[in-house]
Image: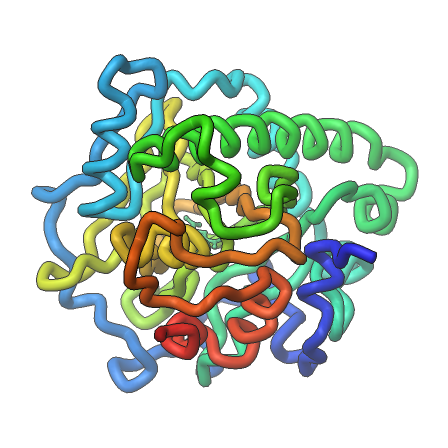
Amino acid sequence: MATSLSEAYRDTTLQLKHIIPLDFDSIHDLPESHVWTTKDNLDLLSEKPDVLSIPIIDLNALSATELVRNACQKWGMFHLINHGIPLSLVDEAEEHARRLFGLPLERKLKALRSPSGATGYGVARISPFFSKLMWHEGFTIMGSAVDHAKELWPDEYEEFCDIMDNYQKKMKSLAYKILLLILKALEVDDKNQDQEINCTPSFYQSEGALQLNSYPCCPNPNRAVGLAPHTDSLLLTILHQNDTNGLQIFQEGTGWVPVPPLSGALVVNMGDLMHIISNAHFPTVYHRVVPNETRHRFSIAYFYGPPTDSIIAPLSKFQTPCFRPVTLKEYISLKSRHLEKALTLLRN
Ligand SMILES: O=C(O)CCC(=O)C(=O)O
Ligand SMILES: [Fe+2]
């Protein structure tokens, strides 16, 4: 039987300190557990001014394929405008994320992710790889949010679920459109997509996950980290960020480049699987979030991938594949044990 995405994430058991976030409401100073130093990977000084910025692409532009190809090659990321997602839906989803994170900690803990689970309230999944904790709390949804939503709001969970369902549905069809555009940018002929993509026909029956992120105002942002540097595992991520800075991407030879929010736009970034499929022509984006002293940042990330049993490999047009084939399930397991080294382990 096919493995669902949440089952694929269920093979690790974590300690509670790597699940339960801080009670941010009761904290006025940065606790030692959250103080990062250069040794802990805190490298804020290399941040570059706003002179560099990732491209803005209009989904309906005649030259969209060309623009996507250039953006993916150089940045692995772009802002997307005219994406067709109603802004009212994005606003509603953000509003409900705020409502969730605004609950008292005791209430949020009712929906705590279980030690071997994939969904619910908790710290970032990458947390066990770092000695210090992050200034962040998250809520992960895979499929229906109903079980956890009932734990949060026993009598009024339906609206939250409806909005998250609708948001995921719309994101999924947008992600599919973007995938087709990217395949075109990689010069995969429409007719030969199944053959070119060296994996099972079910590749297009995608699975996705929704990650709500909250980064409360931080008493000492220069010594804290919102979300530690990482790459996203699946094919591509579509991100909404509220009007608060924080996201940065790492550019080889340049350093950390800020990705300030652009009103009405969504941020699209390549994940590890796209890096594999493109035979490393498109970088997987190494990114992080820095906290803010006066503003509370919220973001909503939709991670889009193929079914977990799909085999992922460089497109067959690449004569010298630099990665060996891998199922998504196997890749998730490699990543949860080796984080960024997982890709290196697949190198031919
Ligand atoms: O909050 C953000 O901008 C980034 C979120 C992110 O990187 C993630 O959820 O994987
Ligand atoms: Fe990410």
Residue 151 drawn above or below residue 58:
below
Asked whether the viewer can see residue 247, the reply is no
Residue with the most extreme right position: 155
Quadrant the N terminus occupies: bottom right
Along the viewing direction, whichever of 164 and 138 lies nearer the viewer: 164
Residue 23 sits in quarter: bottom right
Residue 201 sits in quarter: top right
In the image, taking residue 175 as reference, residue 21 lies left or right, namely right
In the image, taking residue 330 as reference, residue 155 lies left or right, namely right
Residue 287 sits in quarter: bottom left
Along the viewing direction, whichever of 9 and 298 lies nearer the viewer: 9
Q: Residue at x 59, y 63 (%)?
A: 327
Q: Residue at x 78, y 41 (%)?
A: 144
Q: Residue at x 62, y 29 (%)?
A: 167
Along the viewing direction, whichever of 192 and 243 lies nearer the viewer: 192
Looking at the rendered structure, the number of numbered marks drawn on it comes to 0
In the image, taking residue 280 as reference, residue 151 lies left or right, namely right
Quadrant the C terminus occupies: bottom left
Q: Residue at x 68, y 44 (%)?
A: 100
Residue 305 drawn above or below residue 59:
below
Along the viewing direction, whichever of 200 and 156 lies nearer the viewer: 200
Spot occupied by residue 30 in the image (x, y as percentages of width and height): 43, 72
Residue 320 drawn above or below residue 258:
below
